[in-house]
Amino acid sequence: MENFIKKTLLTSIGLASMTKDKIEEEVKKFVVQGKLSKEEGKKMAEDFIKEAEETKKNLSENIEKTVNKSVKKLNFASKKDVEKLQKKIQKLEDLINEKLK
């Protein structure tokens, strides 16, 4: 029964978008209905929260990797590249200003 409840929760509400409060609220419904004991509910909520945090972290890392990979493929300048160019431009401006004095 616990597996069915877990699968139902995961399917009805996307785990990555669930907040701690929402997870606890959804699990509490099953406890109130008598489908889970308080201890089972607490354990399930803790497991969901941990899994949600890991899912969010993995999703964020995957998005960052994909964006970085796309930027490299499209040959866009990275923030680091732009900063290097800004420094070079500033040095050149400083040199020009010194020569004009």
Image: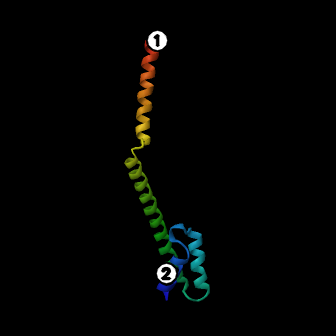
Which residue does the image show at 56% across and 88% down from the upper left?
Answer: 35
The type of residue carrying mark 1 is Leu
Q: Is residue 14 above or below residue 1?
A: above
- Among numbered discs 2 and 1, the one appearing first in the sequence: 2
**How many marks are shown on the rendered structure?**
2
Mark number, residue 2: none
Q: Measuring from the top left, give residue 10's x and y in whole percent.
A: 51, 76
| Extreme residue in the front direction | 74
**73 or 85: nearer the eye?**
73
Q: Is residue 82 above or below residue 10?
A: above
> Which colour style is shown?
rainbow
Which residue does the image show at 40% across and 47% down from the upper left?
Answer: 74
Which residue does the image show at 42% across and 18% down from the upper left?
Answer: 95
Mark 1, other Cα within 10 Å: few <14 / some 14–19 / many ≥20: few
- Residue annotated with mark 1: 100
Q: In the rendered view, does 20 fall on the left or right side of 56? A: right
Mark number, residue 7: 2
Which residue does the image show at 50% across and 67% down from the upper left?
Answer: 16
Q: Measuring from the top left, give residue 76's x and y in whole percent.
A: 42, 43
Quote the CA–CA distance across marks 2 and 1: 73 Å
The type of residue carrying mark 2 is Lys
**82 or 29: nearer the eye?**
82
| Extreme residue in the top direction | 101
Helix, strand or loop at disc 2? helix
Q: Measuring from the top left, give residue 59's x and y in whole percent.
A: 45, 62
